[in-house]
Every structure is written in structure tokens, then in C-alpha cells.
């Protein structure tokens, strides 16, 4: 996973919560094994990525890029409360000023 993250521009960080550290599902999501995690019939594991408060098309594009990489062990499903564009961002400020 670290190699794939290096393909994206800009800094990145990893945060771990101690309550999840002993959870079996947490360990399987970290991608600790050398071979990609696959279900019995050879498909990749599924990961749900949720953005609360909105996401830009650039962020969705970055996740799609990562998912398309050959070494990626996961298929990503993206959920969000809103798609943020330049217009929606400007409208938010215009409503507050206006």
C-alpha cells in the first residue's frame, strides 16, 4: 500500500486508533500480507471509502487511479454526502455573505 500511495502527489499520513489495532478486520484492511487480499474466487477485497461533508472530483479521481493500479489489493466504493465543485463552494460563501 505504501508504494501505491507514493504514486500520488503531496504528503500522506497514516493514523491508527488503538481500539481497532487488535481487531481482525483492522489487520486485514492494512494490507500487511505480501500477496493481494483476494476472496476465494480471485476477486479483490472491497473497501468502502466515505467522505462526510463532501468530496471533490480530484479526490475521487485519485482514488480511482489507486484502484486501477496493478498491485492494488482492493476495489474501492466511494460514498459521500455531497460533490463539491467550484460553483457549490462559491455558492456557500455567497449565501453567508449575501
Image: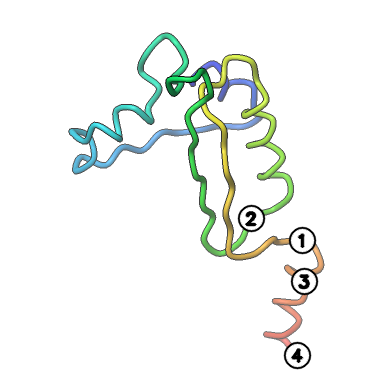
- Residue 29 screen position, x and y as percent: 38, 31
Q: Counting residues from the N terminus, which is met first, the one under dot 2 or under dot 1?
A: 2
- Residue identified by numbered label 2: 55
Mark 4 lies on residue: 98
- The image's mark for residue 85 is 1
Q: Judging from the image, what secondary structure is the residue with disc 4 in?
A: loop
Is the Cβ of the residue at disc 4 closer than 8 Å to that at disc 2?
no
Q: Is residue 29 left or right of residue 67?
A: left
User: Going 45% across and 33% down the picture, which residue do you hit?
Assistant: 13
Mark 1 residue element: loop
The residue singled out by tag 3 in the image is 90
Quadrant of the image for the C terminus?
bottom right
Of labels 1 and 4, earlier in sequence is: 1
Question: Closer to the camera: disc 1 or disc 4?
Answer: 1
Give how far apart the Cα atoms at labels 4 and 2 are. 25 Å
Q: Is residue 9 above or below residue 49?
A: above
Mark 1 and mark 3: Cα distance apart in space: 9 Å
Q: Residues within 10 Å of mark 1 (few under 14, many from 20)?
A: some
Q: Nearer the viewer, mark 2 or mark 3?
A: 2
- As measured in the structure, the alpha-carbon distance from the residue carrying label 2 to the one carrying label 1 is 9 Å
Amino acid at each position: 500500500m505504501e508504494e501505491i500511495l507514493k504514486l500520488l502527489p503531496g504528503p500522506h499520513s497514516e493514523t491508527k486508533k488503538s481500539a481497532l489495532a487488535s481487531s481482525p478486520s483492522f489487520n486485514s484492511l492494512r494490507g500487511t500480507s505480501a500477496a493481494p487480499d483476494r476472496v476465494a474466487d480471485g476477486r479483490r477485497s472491497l473497501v468502502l471509502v466515505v467522505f462526510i461533508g463532501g468530496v471533490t472530483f480530484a479526490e475521487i479521481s485519485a482514488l480511482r487511479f489507486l484502484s486501477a493500479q496493478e498491485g492494488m489489493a482492493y476495489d474501492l466504493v466511494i460514498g459521500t454526502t455531497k460533490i463539491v465543485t467550484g460553483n457549490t463552494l462559491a455558492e456557500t460563501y455567497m449565501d453567508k455573505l449575501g
